[in-house]
Amino acid sequence: MSDIPFSNPGWAGNTGEFDLTEKEVRGDDFVGDRPKDGGHPSGAGTMPYMLVDKDPDAPLFEGEYRQRFEKILTRYPDKRAALLPVLSLAQELRGHVSAESMDEVAGLLELSPAYVRGVTTFYTMYNKRAVGRYLVQVCTNISCNLCGADEVLQAFLRYTDAEMGETSKDGNFTVIEAECLAACGFPTCVQINSRYYENVTPADVAQIIEHLKPEGES
Amino acid sequence: MPEMVTLTIDGTEVKVPKGTTILEAAKQVGKVIPHYCYHPGMSSPAMCRMCLVDVEGAPKPQASCVTTVMENQVVDTESSASVANRRGVLEFYLVNHPLDCPICDMSGECDLQDFVHAEGRDHGRSVEPKRVFGRDDFGGDVLFYGDRCVMCTRCVRFMSEVEQDERLTVVERGNRSVIDTFFEKGLDGTEWHGNIVDICPVGALVSKEFLHKTRAWDLDHTPSICASCSQGCNIELHTAENLVQRVKPRENLEVNAWWMCDYGRHDYEWINHGQRIEAPLVRDATGSSRTTGWKDALTSLLEGASGLNGTSVQIVVSARGSNEDLAALTKLQDVMGGGDKVFRVSQADEESALPGFPTLARRKDLGPNVGGAELLGISRVGESDGTGGLEAVKDHDGIIIVLGDNLEDQDETFGANAGLYVYLGTHECAATKAAHLVLPVTTFAEQEGTFTNHEGRIQRFWPALQPPGMARPAWLILGAVLAELSEGVAPRSAAEAFMNLAEAVPALRGLTYEGMGLSGSVSETAQHASLD
């Protein structure tokens, strides 16, 4: 078919193999425990999916992450322009962008901490507070809502035993509402970390949660 | 000469340089187009949407703060569309505004209040509950009332563009957006943040010092010059009940533009200091003193001086004295026999310039008229904290005249050996104990006069307060003495006193009060210096 020497596991368009199973596409550990090697430097600011295990005390940035940080800087004319991907990288590493992270990123990019705070708080995809291992974002915008998103949201809250926007007691789940996830053809759409679950009904929720829980946990 | 463009604004033709914005051009015809986010000293984001005007031929209303003028343009700021636009925008501004004008410091000088009163709806149509932020301490002198904010971001831009220390930012987005600092790291340590209170068009940023002190409409505004350093920032003294309540900068693009430093802004309590000397004090040979009238006081001054013909006259002046005061004293000194002239002034460790307007700085010399004193040949003595340096004067046995210097570091022996020791000042202290005459003089806030700033610009100030008791300007007192001694005519006004000075000092020749107006004139020596 194609001799492009790379295979993106999340993308089947090049091969025409639309009937792949999810396991075949993404592998077993699509939200699982990838080694914390920071990924390939060419991935720069983006990763195919976020690591699940975060370390809020991880340094900004060392090792592979430092390489990715340097790589990001090379892509922009000045340091200010690199702010968004660098914040993403910090969040990928630490799970959320805390005040300390903003301050450190500001130091790295020679910006004022207040400016970094303004940018961080503007974008909803930066978590300003610590979230659980899995951040469950249930779309409740029009299409999903018409197809029962509210029930799906309630089901997630019930199964994870978490308050809306709060982290469950076991630290595994944070369930929040999301505005449109741009998957209106497949309502209800739920984004868990960086993976989409489409056509979710309340009946599917238990299975999804079971699948996410790491082995050995009930 | 820049290329000129002719356009018509509201039926009036106006000629302005190419590149001028419609909003600035409208000011030329006396039309203030309502606006919040625009400020002439900063960039224009055109985000408040208040200044939209109709331009003939344009498909939609144009933001006049960023649209530059074009030849033969026809602008209508009062078209029904412009008015309807402002009405609509103002209604949105009031959706979350608390309308707490009765307890708001800005009330009476608030752009939101003014514009809504002029063109807004008399009732809002919003029925939803208002969003509430509450208030926040920004550190320094600034308190933030989030609900009053119209999100013009002038304060954010001042900190990033003019002070260039980006302490403020817009946090969150949309309906939740609000001005904030980086968590607890507020404005503390910045030296120009008082300006964000001035440029806030509403009552969102208020001064803690002025908070609930008095109402804006009870204040009298008097143009003046900041007396805190030798920069000579143009200011307004806002007074009520014969007290300075606050100090605000006054526009002068040659000196301070629209800004002033926090040091000068908050350094005014000394003007209000009570317990002033209110009547002349004459001390007789036994050492006891009595209050007296001006005639008696000046008579005894002349009597005291007449017995000391030929002795040298040492004078100590303050850098807060006006040009007229200092000139009257130096002239009197010359007539009486001449001698050393000295002044003392406190100095800051270093200048702190405003990065976005670098010709403006809090200068090292913390006195407004160091330039004037030096122009008159008065020499600087003492330490950098304004003390010492008077060893020669202290035990002088001729005539000592002190004007304005408060002599706080001197003890009771100061002037004890003098044949005649005249103290002209505002407060008594240990060092005035030996004075034969203690004469009450006015501060710069109570008299008319001029200061010479660090670059030789002579600038006028006007009386803002009633002087206490019998206190008079020093030029008036000394001018009367001088007229008596030299059989001349005493000046009757500060303008006359200045004319005498301008005739005597070649560098000032040709300058007049009228010519100086509100923004001052640069003296000739300074002009030569800048040409070299």
Image: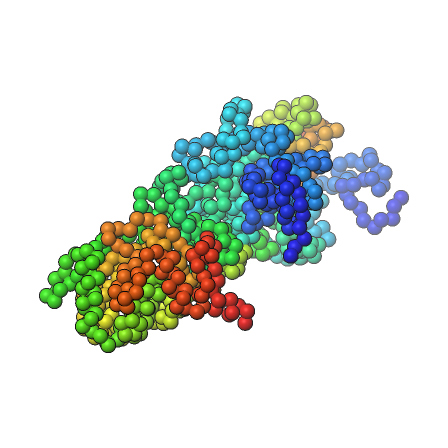
Residue A5 in sight from this viewpoint: yes
User: Does A159 sit above or below residue B236?
Assistant: above
| Quadrant in the picture for the N terminus of chain B | bottom right
Residue B47: quadrant of the picture: top right
Q: Position of residue A130 (x, y in %)?
A: 55, 42
Along the viewing direction, whichever of B16 and B335 lies nearer the viewer: B335
Q: Position of residue B151 (x, y in %)?
A: 54, 39
Horizontal arrangement in the rendering, residue B412 relative to residue B36 (left or right): left
* Residue at x 45% of width, y 36% of height: B134
Q: Position of residue B378 (x, y in %)?
A: 36, 70
Residue A104 in sight from this viewpoint: no
User: Farthest residue toward the left?
Assistant: B286
* Residue at x 12% of width, y 62% of height: B288
User: Does A114 sit above or below residue B347?
Assistant: above
| Quadrant in the picture for the C terminus of chain B | bottom right
Q: Position of residue B313 (x, y in %)?
A: 26, 73
Residue A210: quadrant of the picture: top right
* Residue at x 52% of width, y 34% of height: B115
Horizontal arrangement in the rendering, residue A68 relative to residue B298 (left or right): right
Indicate the colouring scheme.
rainbow
User: Does B69 sit above or below residue B438?
Assistant: above
Along the viewing direction, whichever of A40 and B135 lies nearer the viewer: B135
Along the viewing direction, whichever of B125 and B231 lies nearer the viewer: B231
Along the viewing direction, whichever of B344 and B150 lies nearer the viewer: B344
* Residue at x 54% of width, y 45% of height: B154
